[in-house]
Amino acid sequence: MNLPVPARPTNTLAIISLVLGILSWIALPIVGAIGAVICGHMARGEIRRAPGAYEGDGMAVAGLILGYLHLALFVLALLFVFFVLGGLAFFAHFH
């Protein structure tokens, strides 16, 4: 007789990481991205330390990707504003 195997719980930090990663693109730009990255790394650490105890590694990775991508685009936007628009202001000062 085969007994049903209980489902493994999904890691809570992995869920939070994914939710914050999505929210970073919708409502919480920087705070959500930073939270997604922190929670994603913490979730993956918990999942690795207890093999077979938790589900959710994919959610944690998705949260990490969304968070890091948002932060990278934010840094690129800041660099654009600083160098391109700042350069235009600098050269406009001399004309």
Image: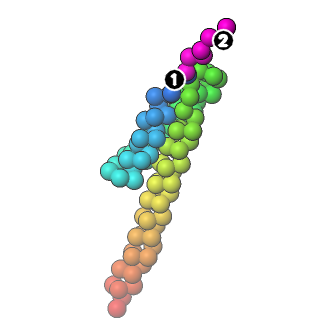
Position in image of residue 76 (x %, y %): 48, 64
The colour scheme is rainbow
- Residue 73 vs 64, above or below: the answer is below
Residue 73 in the figure: left or right of residue 48: left
Question: Can residue 90 be seen from the camera position used here?
Answer: no
Question: Where is the C terminus found, in terms of image quarters?
Answer: bottom left
Q: Magenta part mainly helix, strand or loop? A: loop
Residue numbers of the magenta segment: 1-7
The residue carrying pointer 1 sits among few (fewer than 14), some (14 to 19) or many (20 or more) residues within 10 Å by Cα, namely few
Q: Residue furthest top?
A: 1
Disc 2 secondary structure class: loop
| Along the viewing direction, whichever of 81 and 70 lies nearer the viewer | 70
Residue drawn at x 60%, y 16% as measured from the top left: 5
Residue drawn at x 49%, y 49% as measured from the top left: 66
17 in magenta: no
The residue carrying pointer 2 sits among few (fewer than 14), some (14 to 19) or many (20 or more) residues within 10 Å by Cα, namely few
Q: Residue under circle 2?
A: 2
Q: Residue under circle 1?
A: 9
